[in-house]
Image: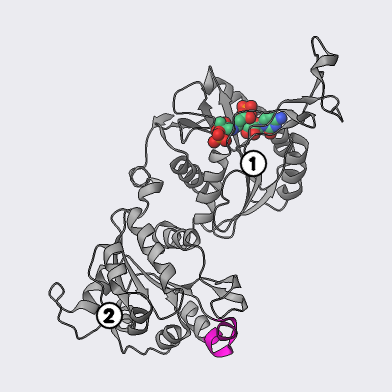
Amino acid sequence: MERSLMNGAIENRMQKFMFEGKHIVVGITGGIAAYKAAELVSQLRQRGADVHCIMTTHAAKLVSPITFGELSGHDVTVDMFANISHWDVEHIALARLADLFLIAPATANIIGKVACGIADDMLSTTVMATKAPVLVVPAMNTNMYENPIVQRNIQTLREVGYTVMEPEEGHLACNTSGKGRFPKTEAILAAAEKLLFGRHLLRGKKVIVSAGGTQENIDPVRYIGNRSSGRMGYAIARAAAMEDADVTLVSCTKELPVPEGVSVCYVQNARELKKEMDARFEDSDIAIMAAAVSDYRTKTEAKQKIKKEAHDALQIELELNPDILYGLGQKKTHQFLVGFAAETNDVIEHGKEKLVRKNLDMLVANDVSQKGAGFNVETNIASILYRDHTMEQFPIMTKEELGRVIVEKIAERL
Ligand code: PMT
């Protein structure tokens, strides 16, 4: 059975416009980090969200509502009893409109009020009236954050289903250092994306993903490498983390930002990659080999830079590297094992052969000779082959989208 398809939901969610069509209400409270919420609102809007801001009166003393009005493209609500021209009952209208409700920064005060059911201003009233998922981003002085009352209130919010992010550690506005900093915008965006689109498909699963191209040293300055950028593996790791998996990337590159919530272990050559994949395999539920592994390495590595003056012609003897994926296939017990095949001809035939020989559950075959597919580009064109001899072919899509497809397909077959 061979079919060609493209999941519409996935097609519509280009990374850049990941919040397209979503209404996000952002509540800004009176912490010094209120100025950082301006960047957050800007990023949400740039990524397609329709953003509405509600500020507390304290927040409006720290940053002008005009800033948030300009960045969101909508009037900012501060006063519950101000003249309102465009909403019937504004707190109810915004509460209903929201696909996601974000409170960022969230002070100890708003956390306490919401936890105790107090609704005495526009923000606390609107949160109380919403049925949308709520994402709370605390930012405050460390002592306040660690205060057992604040911690108890945070716990209460979590128990009723709100998502409360952990603040970062570091320098604080009160000139001390500790836990309480407003998280990075990227981390908040990732948490928002997870709440809006995540389906918990891999909850409780441990996933290892290899990414990038190995480098085999010739001498201290030269190596044998390949054109893999790591994007495909990083996209899969990101998609798996969004579906609640516990993800570790074993990465041959340090060039890419590590996706939020993903652990990373850096390696350079095939033997290091094998060591790290082997060490984690027993304990994992899913292993995905997206890395481009050098089949050969130099038999000896020169300790000093090889000088051209000493050689008219240079011969380098190569020896075979271990096939990491084959090794994992041999010792697999409960794990779902996914391999890739980078081919330039007879892609499906080679893919089928690799799937069987390496004892895989799934194989992603990409024809790396096609424009827009394979190494070091933003997109890929893939066919997914399954152990039961079925296959699905996909049109060109971004690697982020393909990462989500791969994760969905794994989840369907677990
Ligand atoms: O990183 P990008 O720039 O985003 O590019 C993505 C990619 C093209 C690298 C990716 O989509 C891909 O195809 N990765 C696999 C590349 C590869 O090594 O293919 P292969 O057909 O040579 O190997 C088959 C499988 O065996 C792969 O899963 C590979 O990781 C694994 N292998 C290969 C050799 C080896 N010694 N050990 C292995 O485990």
Secondary structure found at label 1: loop
Residue range highlighted in magenta: 141-152
**Residue at position x 57%, y 41% in the image:** 233
Secondary structure found at label 2: loop
Q: Position of residue 46 (x, y in %)?
A: 34, 54
Q: Is mark 2 within 8 Å of ligand 1?
A: no
Answer whether residue 358 is visible to the viewer in this image. no
Q: Is mark 1 within 8 Å of ligand 1?
A: yes
**Residue at position x 48%, y 58% in the image:** 186
Which secondary structure class fits the magenta region best? helix
Q: Amino acid at mark 2?
A: Val
* Residue, far front: 309
Q: Which mark is residue 78?
A: 2
**Image-quadrant location for residue 43:** bottom left
Q: Which mark is residue 253?
A: 1
Q: Position of residue 239 (x, y in %)?
A: 50, 50
**Residue at position x 60%, y 43% in the image:** 255
